[in-house]
Image (spheres, rainbow, N blue to C red):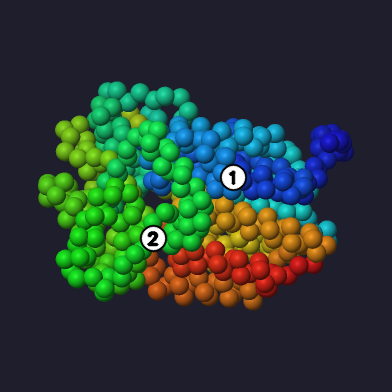
Amino acid sequence: MTSATSEAGTTTRAPETLDALVIGAGVAGLYQLHQLRREGLTVLGLDTASDVGGTWYWNRYPGAKFDSESYIYQYLFDEGLYKDWTWSERFPGQPEIERWLHYIADRLDLRKDFRFSTTVTSAVYDEARGRWTVRTNRGETFDTQFLIGCCGMLSAPLENRFPGQDRFTGRIFHTARWPKEALDFTGKRVGVVGIGATGIQVIQTIAGEAGHLKVFIRTPQYVLPMKNPKFGPAEEKAYKARFDELRQNLPRTFTGFEYDFENAWADLTPAQRRARLEEIHANGSLKLWLASFAEIFSDEAVSEEVSEFVREKMRARLKDPRLIDLLVPQDYGFGTHRVPLETNYLEVYHRDDVEAVSVRDNPIAEVVPEGIRLADGTLHELDVIILATGFDAGSGALARIDIRGRGGRSLKEDWGRDIRTTLGMQVHGYPNLFMTGAPLAPSAALCNMTTCLQQQTEWITDCITYLRDLGRSVVEPSAAAEDEWVRHHDETANATLIAKTNSWYVGSNVPGKPRRVLSYTGGVGTYRAKCLEVADGGYPGFVMT
């Protein structure tokens, strides 16, 4: 790289020339870089973090763990890579998951082609040259043919939610920006804001550590108990023997998990339905949500019956009428929100040192130096505030980069009006820009992430290889192709109860965000088949020049 001195006397570095630049060093980014490098492209990866890991780098809060079974949350493109790593339990915690991703990076020698502690600030498409100019917070500039955003579907945390956060005299942080150093909550007054999947993991883990824990509760969540057995040599041998089966089946199920819907609701008697629900509930996984009865997503009567089954299980554990009112959902159906797994979470609220604070009708007004003040003036004095306040899902991470396509159009502004993609992997008006975990694909929410991210990165690699083999340099979906995919996506999504429920699945947690079901709801197997059909047909609807 050369440098030059401008008239103002400042030193600028000449752009580095690349075939492809990958943003993100998580599950998608690691595999994407590996594939493109194997195809002979000059490729570089960038990440804000100081090492690989993606979501498992950032989300190091107490209790963070898988809710996909460990043996399916893996890469399946290499049998040796799969079998040479051994998990300690069914649902491991963040430290073990981060070690696994380090194992992947070391085994594939990926770090040499990543630069860490580097944030992409802008990316501008040059129509005359058919290339992207990418800039970072470190003053670097890259000239690249392809730009691939592997930024994560839940990696844009909603940190500044309440007025006055900067005035708080204690410690305050979002769960996705948890400090690396160990925190001691002994004797501390701790407040947790939010009881989604993340908040639940934090609450059940630190309840016995904090001097006093206050949980600020707005929207109750359906929860399922987790069963998390340890793996010994027998369990390890059993799951590793299933490698070929998992490689074949996971991409073809509805959600990319090992299980799938087996029975239609109408085909079973009431007694058989109840027995089926009891059996699956006892499994201690997400199976009740993802493989009980598909009708819970579309039939209000079925949804209500299954929802009442889960409510019954929760009420039996809570007992206290006030806690039942606060923590058991009534106004939406089971599975239309993200369903958390938990371990003795509900029982936490029976502790004398845990207080459930309702903010449903008395919301948080502000953070003051002493703690949190509610709308009615009530002050909750705290030493630590933990914000489990969620993310700008699907679109947020890319929209926080100043991405400019044809004619200077802004992706942030375009998505601020209407969130659209083609197959969840490209956007009309942004040639040679690819993305994973983005809106209108299953990976935006409804998928075992490794299943979907492997499929998407492989499709992107195949598309780039096809383009180069043709001797072309630019690929972009047509407006008509994008319209067709959005129409199909919406028809599928709007037939579900998810579309009728306020949640981050439709962007309602972010003020002003256009409402659209973020995830493709037609199923992982169906989505994969449609992507393969496009590739096998020579990419109809994608203009290659």
Q: Quadrant of residue 528?
A: bottom right
Q: Quadrant of residue 263?
A: bottom left
- Kindly identify the amino acid type of the residue bearing the numbered disc 2: Asp
**Label number found at residue 539:** none
Residue 279's place in the image compared with 64, above or below, is below
Q: Is residue 114 visible?
A: yes
Q: Residue at x 73, y 64 (%)?
A: 475
Looking at the rendered image, the disc whose residue lies closer to the viewer, 2 or 1, is 1
Closer to us: 187 or 519: 519
Sequence-first disc among 2 and 1:
1
Q: Residue at x 77, y 47 (%)?
A: 40
Q: Which residue is mark 2?
A: 260
Residue 80's place in the image compared with 129, above or below, is above
Q: Which residue is mark 1?
A: 78
- x and y, in percent, of residue 448 in the image: 46, 52
Q: Residue at x 21, y 35 (%)?
A: 354
**How far apart are the alpha carbons under marks 2 and 1?**
24 Å
Q: Quadrant of the N terminus?
A: top right
- x and y, in percent, of residue 444 in the image: 49, 57
Task: Determine contact: label 2, label 1, CB under 8 Å.
Answer: no
Mark 1 surroundings: few (<14), some (14-19) or many (≥20) residues within 10 A: few
Mark 2 surroundings: few (<14), some (14-19) or many (≥20) residues within 10 A: some
- x and y, in percent, of residue 235 in the image: 38, 38
Q: Residue at x 26, y 33 (%)?
A: 207
